[in-house]
Image (cartoon, rainbow, N blue to C red):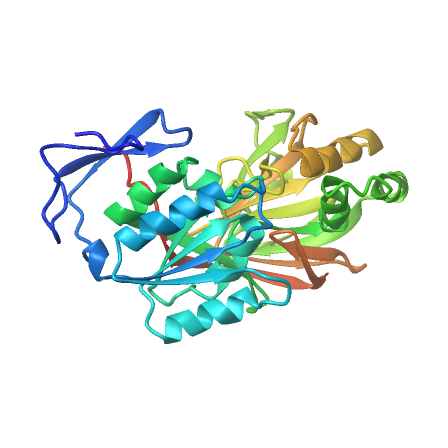
Amino acid sequence: MKTSAGLRRSGGPPAPGNRPAIAFIPVSDGTLYKPYTGFEMEPAHDRKIALIQNPASGAQDSEPRKRVRERLERICNSLTEITVEPGLNIAERTAKLVRDGIDLVVVAAGDSTVHEAASSLVRTGKSLAIVPLGTFNNLALSLDLPREVNAICDLIEVGHTREIDVGIADEHHHFFEAAGVGVDAELFPIGEEVKSGRLGSIVRAIRLAVHYRQKSIELEFDRPVLEAYHCSFRGQAPLRRRRRRFQRSRRRIKLRCSFVAIGNGPYYGSNFNVCPGAVLDDGLFSIGVYRDFSKLELMRHLWSISRGQRLYNPKMEMFESKTLRVSSPNRMCVHVDGRPIGTTPVRFRILAKALKVVAPAEVF
């Protein structure tokens, strides 16, 4: 049997409360299928579901949002719908849903709304489902979620979940994509303004790139630098030869760089692959130290953020760690998922498997 969204099940439709032994979940554009088996979930019709819709996210087409609501109404016994309006505190509203005993929060929106809702679901045991209706949908991309509404609703109905890691800065600011320290944190708000059509911000970006100089920083890992160091990049390929200066037993190292990216997942901004190889559930940050940028390369980096075009060649060193402390003689700007949170010093910590999300299962 095949549903309209392409979810195929062996045999006839399952009886209420039962689940198929084998299923194939569409991922990405819906043309590729991942198999999974042997899961046990609460029957969909016994769940209390909250749907958070943001009409301002992505395309201004109400039809996909209507289809999401209709599908969810058929697979639960209680649906609470919340429409995001100016002034609504999404994090507080989500926290109240958790206190009221909600089982699943479905966010039909973009990255910003997902971030706000997810922040209130960390370590609650409540599940988050993402219907990627925003412009870039970074977390959905990292989770390999289908983009088609019916396909993602089929995935919600099946109910398979994964537990993914969450980053936290200074024990207060959660992030799900990546954090950054340095010129990246200064350029990101400008890139968002350019993306929003405020082209006058390009002048500010050019001025910042022209006058910016690399700054000294100190990185402190949870392990010796020798163990934390992963590889170096020049261009798109990793260098085969490890840098000698990283062959040391101390946990701290001083560098000069343009910015440091702390990746929980691989994508942020405009689908910018800021930390190649980052995995959402490995219990580690992927830390990219971007060094020796020319003025032109900084401008190309801004363009990557504002337009999703990865044109520049990174010059970077990659590290892995569960924690990271960044300090500097001169204060440097800090962001989490594109949100400015202050300046250095700052401490990052990974919260392993702290968020439950609806997602395709692993490939067998």
Q: Nearer the viewer, residue 325 or 57?
A: 57
| Image position, residue 174 (x, y; %) | 54, 61
Look at 78% across and 35% down and name the residue there: 298
The answer to whether residue 175 of the structure is visible from this angle is no
Relative side of 316 to 45, left or right: right
| Image position, residue 3 (x, y; %) | 24, 33
Look at 15% across and 44% down and name the residue there: 38
| Image position, residue 262 (x, y; %) | 58, 49
Q: Name above or below for residue 140 compared with residue 1.
A: below
Give the quadrant of the N terminus: top left
Which of the 4 quarters of the picture holds residue 126? bottom left
The answer to whether residue 99 of the structure is visible from this angle is yes
Relative side of 293 to 57, left or right: right
Q: Report the number of discs.
A: 0
Q: Nearer the viewer, residue 173 or 102?
A: 102
Give the quadrant of the C terminus: top left
Look at 26% across and 57% down and name the residue there: 76
Q: Name above or below for residue 354 compared with residue 147.
A: below
Relative side of 283 to 346, left or right: left
